[in-house]
């Protein structure tokens, strides 16, 4: 400290702060911390004060300190809050007294969010309780040609008190008495945290619960480390840029039961859908609401307050986000409903296609089964037992009595044979095996075949029909394959003959 200037240096001798004061004497200035907390620089040979901390308040207003306006230096004597609980840098919150005015004002930058009201010489219009604050006395407003300011004195010598502009943006009075273990909060203005303008920054909602600030869906804290320290002034930023400027699609997140942000623009439109359309067509529109009329916001959203569930005064706000950020819960109902129908339509289309494929495959497999009949070197077509067993089951109830028609064509004599459904058990004896019974009846003679007719045919069928009047034919010889059943039914029969005839199945 030289010539009345106190300088604070770091280890490398670089100046980081000074009182920026001066004196004519090189080494005679004295620095003293007084009992009231005022830090002063003065000339020891006189009572002249060169510099004092009460003229430059930070975030704390002590008894005897000043908050006002220095007319000689044309400077405001204001309280400024810390940026966070660990960062003493100046924030945007301040307490000021306008020149030639008796208002105490709270500001966030250039935005006024609280005022004490006029001073009537005893109390403020909006702070009448100051008259019964027994920790404070002689609250006074002084105005002269050099300065105008408010000051006060402590009410009890054994009780300490101070006013602090907190990092929350609230002006608070703390008290410490002998029986108190620490500083106790006595008074706060504004009383609600969310009444502090833009405390949570842009695109963030404020509520009285913990955490007090919360980014709107589709947004994230701009500076996470500051956010965790309680400094929300930087607010939130978009996770994904809007797509409007690239001719893409944007959507809206629904924020319910809120108090509207500041600075809306009122428009005259017929309904909420038209209000949404106006906002969508304007890429600078960040939100819209329809509450007895259309409101839109054309910039960052500040002072968005989330109200308690039992507060019925809340309104709905639609905040614009990139369509890719839309997760459904906060989406505009119409958009959500449209997405649901799209999903159901896609699922329905998939199942329809899948079912059609199954039907086609099923039909082809059964057609292939019907077509896979083995042709032997005789006048017969050999049916697999599975095919014979399943044919009656695959017919409709109306045609169950018709059985299965097998046509043998040899030479000039077409023969039609109606087979009876073979649903009898073949486990007991060979006589019940239907192919064996057919072969036996053929050997007995033409008339015996009538006993094989299904009773449901009700006699409306001929077993053997010769084309009478067309061509003279003899009785067709019994094929050797069937003859083998009656010769020795218990032994396997292998036929190796060659036939020039053709056989068809219908």
Image: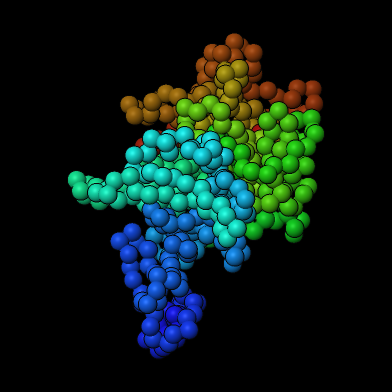
* Residue 44, quarter of the rendered image: bottom left
Instruction: Tell me the residue at 52%/53% (across/down).
Output: 149
* Residue 260, quarter of the rendered image: top right
Q: Nearer the viewer, residue 352 or 276?
A: 276
Image position of 410 with respect to 68: above or below: above
In the picture, the quarter occupied by the N terminus is: bottom left
In the picture, the quarter occupied by the C terminus is: top right
Percent of width and height locating residue 152 = 42, 49
* Residue 72, quarter of the rendered image: bottom right
Q: Which of 277 and 106 is in front in this view?
A: 106
Count of marks overlaid on the render = 0
Percent of width and height locating residue 493 = 44, 43
Q: As drawn, which residue projects farthest toward the top?
A: 458
Percent of width and height locating residue 414 = 69, 31
Instruction: Tell me the residue at 62%/50% (across/down).
Output: 100
Q: Which of 256 and 112 is in front in this view?
A: 112
Res. 199 visible in picture: no
Q: In this view, does 88 lie to the left or right of 287?
A: left
State how the image is colored: rainbow
Instruction: Tell me the residue at 74%/59% (across/down).
Output: 246
Q: Is residue 281 left or right of residue 147?
A: right
Q: As drawn, which residue projects farthest toward the front?
A: 46
Percent of width and height locating residue 191 = 45, 39
Res. 47 visible in picture: yes
Instruction: Tell me the residue at 59%/10% (across/down).
Output: 458
Q: As drawn, which residue projects farthest toward the bottom?
A: 12
Q: Nearer the viewer, residue 457 or 200?
A: 200
């Amino acid at each position: 400290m030289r010539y009345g200037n106190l300088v604070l240096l770091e280890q490398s001798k670089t100046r980081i702060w000074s009182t920026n004061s001066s004196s004519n004497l090189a080494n005679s200035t004295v620095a003293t911390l007084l009992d009231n907390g005022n830090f002063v620089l003065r000339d020891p040979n006189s009572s002249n004060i060169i510099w004092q901390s009460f003229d430059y308040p930070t975030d704390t207003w002590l008894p005897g300190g000043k908050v006002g306006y220095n007319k000689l230096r044309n400077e405001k004597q204001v309280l400024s809050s810390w940026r966070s609980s660990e960062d003493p840098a100046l924030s945007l919150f301040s307490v000021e007294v306008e020149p030639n005015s008796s208002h105490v004002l709270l500001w966030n930058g250039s935005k006024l969010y609280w005022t004490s009201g006029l001073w009537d010489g005893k109390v403020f219009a909006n702070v009448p309780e100051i008259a019964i604050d027994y920790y404070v006395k002689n609250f006074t407003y002084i105005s002269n040609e050099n300065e105008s300011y408010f000051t006060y004195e402590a009410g009890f010598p054994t009780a300490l008190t101070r006013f602090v502009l907190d990092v929350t943006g609230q002006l608070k009075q703390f008290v410490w008495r002998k029986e108190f273990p620490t500083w106790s909060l006595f008074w706060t203005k504004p009383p609600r945290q969310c009444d502090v303008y833009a405390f949570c920054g842009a695109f963030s909602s404020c509520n009285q619960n913990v955490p007090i600030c919360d980014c709107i869906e589709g947004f994230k804290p701009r500076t996470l480390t500051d956010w965790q320290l309680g400094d929300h002034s930087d607010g939130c930023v978009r996770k994904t840029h809007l797509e409007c400027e690239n001719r893409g699609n944007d959507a809206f997140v629904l924020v319910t039961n809120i108090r509207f942000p500041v600075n809306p623009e009122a428009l005259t439109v017929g309904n909420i859908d038209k209000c949404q359309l106006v906002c969508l067509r304007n890429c600078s529109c960040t939100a819209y609401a329809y509450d007895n009329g259309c409101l839109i916001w054309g910039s960052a959203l500040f002072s968005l307050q989330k109200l308690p569930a039992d507060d019925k005064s809340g309104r709905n706000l639609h905040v614009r986000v990139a369509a890719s950020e839309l997760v459904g819960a906060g989406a505009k109902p119409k958009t959500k409903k449209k997405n649901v129908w799209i999903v159901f339509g896609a699922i329905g289309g998939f199942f329809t296609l899948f079912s059609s494929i199954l039907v086609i495959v099923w039909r082809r497999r059964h057609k292939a089964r019907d077509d896979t009949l083995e042709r032997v070197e005789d006048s017969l077509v050999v049916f697999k037992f599975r095919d014979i067993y399943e044919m009656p089951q695959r017919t409709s109830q109306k045609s169950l009595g018709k059985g299965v028609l097998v046509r043998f064509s040899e030479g000039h004599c077409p023969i039609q044979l109606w087979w009876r459904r073979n649903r009898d058990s073949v486990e007991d004896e060979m006589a019940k095996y239907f192919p064996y019974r057919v072969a036996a009846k053929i050997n007995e003679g033409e008339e015996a075949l009538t006993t094989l007719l299904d009773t449901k045919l009700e006699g409306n069928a001929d077993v053997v029909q010769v084309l009478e009047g067309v061509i003279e034919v003899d009785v067709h010889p019994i094929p050797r394959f069937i003859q083998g059943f009656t010769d020795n039914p218990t032994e396997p029969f292998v036929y190796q003959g060659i036939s020039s005839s053709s056989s068809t199945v219908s």
